[in-house]
């Protein structure tokens, strides 16, 4: 039935603007196909967008697997790895380890203090800062770029390099700055202790935290789930306690 008085949608102000196309919500990701939103020209933005959408997507759960048995996150990781050479994968993890050690020294010294608060920092806050910063690069990769971590032992090796560099840079700073006022004999004895016991401490405590990251990686990312850092917290807490206990005994 035709209406003589027309329709409200015939009014000019109700007509769509050709210069402003209607943009609807993106299609929901399906469990059986790789979503189109991963195929973008800007790889970095696509990675971040994909990770954010997977974070809030029910399809990232293990129950929602494709016919090949992969979750949405597994598909994203496999797609990203397919476009990277083994040299690039190893290089990125190595770079994170090489940067984390020296940066951790700077961060630890910048956060330090003197007097009573300095003692409190060495026993309580300092170990937390050091252990978290030495593992910071790995935590970033595991949470934001998980396709770069291919094997669990890569986590252990990278953490070992980071801790070893931390110990080396810290000793160079101590020997050249903080202990420069001591006599040569006293400084040599103290530095000999630091090059052995202290470096071993840094590597050992970081290995404890890295075991936690590896455990969390095997239980999550390796099974197509988002990385859960809470699984590694008991290990990192143990590393902090060991480190803080050593500092307390060394005072």
Image (cartoon, rainbow, N blue to C red):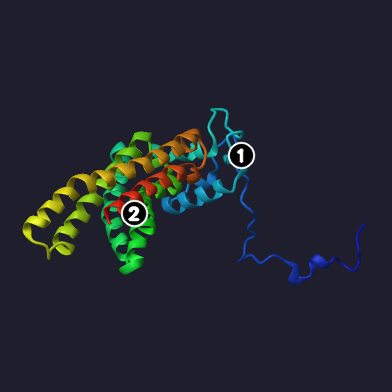
Q: Residue furthest right?
A: 1
The percent position of residue 159, horizontal first and vertical second, equals: 32, 43
State the residue position of label 1.
Answer: 30
Q: Is residue 221 left or right of residue 112?
A: right
**Where residue 130 is drawn, which disc sits there?**
2
| Residue at point 30%, 51% (across, down) | 249
Q: Nearer the viewer, mark 1 or mark 2?
A: 2
Q: Is residue 151 visible?
A: no
Q: Residue furthest left?
A: 184
Q: Are marks 1 and 2 in contact (CB under 8 Å)?
A: no
| Cα gap from disc 1 to disc 2, whole angstroms | 42 Å
| Image-quadrant location for residue 106 | bottom left
Q: Earlier in the sequence, mark 1 or mark 2?
A: 1
| Image-quadrant location for residue 117 | bottom left
Looking at the picture, does residue 148 appear above or below residue 182? Answer: above
Classify mark 1: residues with Cα within 10 Å, few (<14), some (14-19) or many (20+). Answer: few
| Residue at point 15%, 58% (across, down) | 175
User: Which residue is nearer to you in this view: 159 or 206?
Assistant: 206
């Amino acid at each position: 039935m035709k209406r003589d008085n027309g329709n409200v949608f015939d009014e000019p102000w109700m007509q769509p603007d050709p210069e402003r196309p209607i943009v609807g919500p993106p299609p929901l990701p399906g469990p059986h196909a790789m979503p189109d939103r991963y195929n973008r020209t800007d790889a970095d933005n696509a990675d971040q967008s994909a990770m954010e959408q997977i974070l809030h997507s029910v399809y990232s759960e293990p129950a929602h697997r494709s016919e090949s048995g992969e979750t949405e996150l597994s598909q994203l990781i496999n797609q990203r790895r397919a476009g990277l050479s083994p040299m690039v994968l190893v290089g990125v993890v190595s770079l994170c380890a090489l940067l984390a050690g020296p940066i951790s020294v700077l961060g630890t010294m910048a956060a330090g203090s003197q007097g009573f608060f300095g003692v409190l920092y060495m026993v309580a806050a300092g170990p937390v800062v050091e252990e978290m910063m030495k593992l910071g690069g790995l935590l970033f990769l595991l949470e934001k770029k998980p396709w770069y971590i291919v094997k669990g032992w890569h986590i252990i090796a990278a953490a070992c390099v980071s801790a070893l560099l931390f110990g080396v840079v810290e000793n160079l700073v101590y020997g050249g700055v903080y202990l420069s006022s001591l006599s040569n004999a006293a400084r040599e004895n103290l530095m000999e202790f630091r090059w052995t016991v202290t470096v071993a401490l840094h590597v050992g405590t970081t290995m404890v935290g890295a075991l936690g990251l590896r455990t969390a990686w095997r239980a999550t990312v390796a099974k197509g789930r988002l990385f859960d850092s809470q699984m590694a917290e008991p290990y990192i807490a143990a590393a902090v306690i060991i480190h803080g206990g050593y500092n307390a005994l060394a005072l």
